[in-house]
């Protein structure tokens, strides 16, 4: 997909995310301890629904419930994941703030671990 990196999806800038992903991967490559299963790329320093809607510019959210916000965040994470070719998820930090996370594949799994058994 040939897309301008300055594109924003709601409040997420693809160029900024790609830069953050590269930095996170560089830090992980230099890490000598065990690799985490996810890395925080951005924290929005709030857990309040209204603040999250404003920060991420989710103004088309019809119902302002936490459940509808969660669904919107899942959809947004999926869309951006496809555009940056990485798995991104929203979650909450230990402080209770919404964050955007990069999922790190388990490096100990070989490609054969994902093979489908067709003989069953």
Image (cartoon, rainbow, N blue to C red):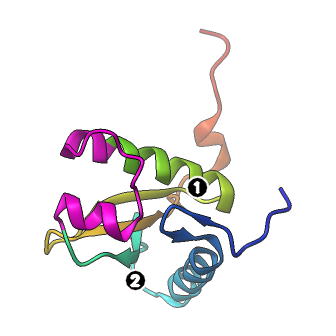
Residue position for label 2: 33
Alpha carbon separation for disc pair 1 and 2: 26 Å
**Residue shown at 36% from the left, 58% from the top:** 90
Q: Position of residue 82 (x, y in %)?
A: 64, 51
Q: In this picture, is 78 found above or below 56?
A: above
- Would residue 5 be found to the left or right of residue 120 on screen? right
| Residue 99 image-quadrant placement | bottom left
Residue position for label 1: 81
**Residue shown at 63% from the left, 26% from the top:** 116
Q: Position of residue 67 (x, y in %)?
A: 23, 40
Graded by Cα atoms within 10 Å as few (under 14), some (14 to 19) or many (20 or more), the crowding at tag 2 reads few
**Residue shown at 55% from the left, 81% from the top:** 20
State which quarter of the image contains the N terminus.
bottom right
Task: Assign a secondary structure to mark 1.
Answer: helix
**Residue shown at 86% from the left, 61% from the top:** 2
Which region is colored magenta?
47-70
- Residue sitting nearer the eye, 96 or 38: 96
Task: Assign a secondary structure to mark 2.
Answer: loop
Graded by Cα atoms within 10 Å as few (under 14), some (14 to 19) or many (20 or more), the crowding at tag 1 reads some
| Residue 39 image-quadrant placement | bottom left
Magenta-span inclusion, residue 57: yes
Mark drawn on residue 59:
none
Q: Position of residue 25 (x, y in %)?
A: 57, 79
Disc on the earlier residue, 1 or 2: 2
Q: Where is residue 55 in the image (x, y as percent from the top left)?
A: 35, 71
State which quarter of the image contains the C terminus.
top right
Magenta-span inclusion, residue 52: yes
């Amino acid at each position: 997909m040939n897309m301008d990196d300055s594109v924003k999806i709601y409040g997420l800038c693809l160029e900024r995310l790609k830069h953050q992903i590269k930095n996170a991967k560089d830090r992980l490559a230099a890490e000598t301890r065990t690799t985490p299963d996810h890395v925080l790329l951005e924290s929005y320093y709030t857990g309040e629904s209204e603040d999250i809607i404003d920060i991420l510019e989710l103004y088309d959210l019809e119902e302002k419930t936490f459940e509808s916000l969660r669904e919107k965040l899942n959809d947004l994470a999926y869309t951006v994941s496809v555009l940056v070719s990485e798995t991104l998820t929203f979650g909450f930090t230990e402080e209770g703030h919404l964050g955007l996370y990069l999922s790190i594949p388990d490096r100990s799994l070989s490609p054969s671990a994902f093979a489908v058994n067709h003989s069953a």
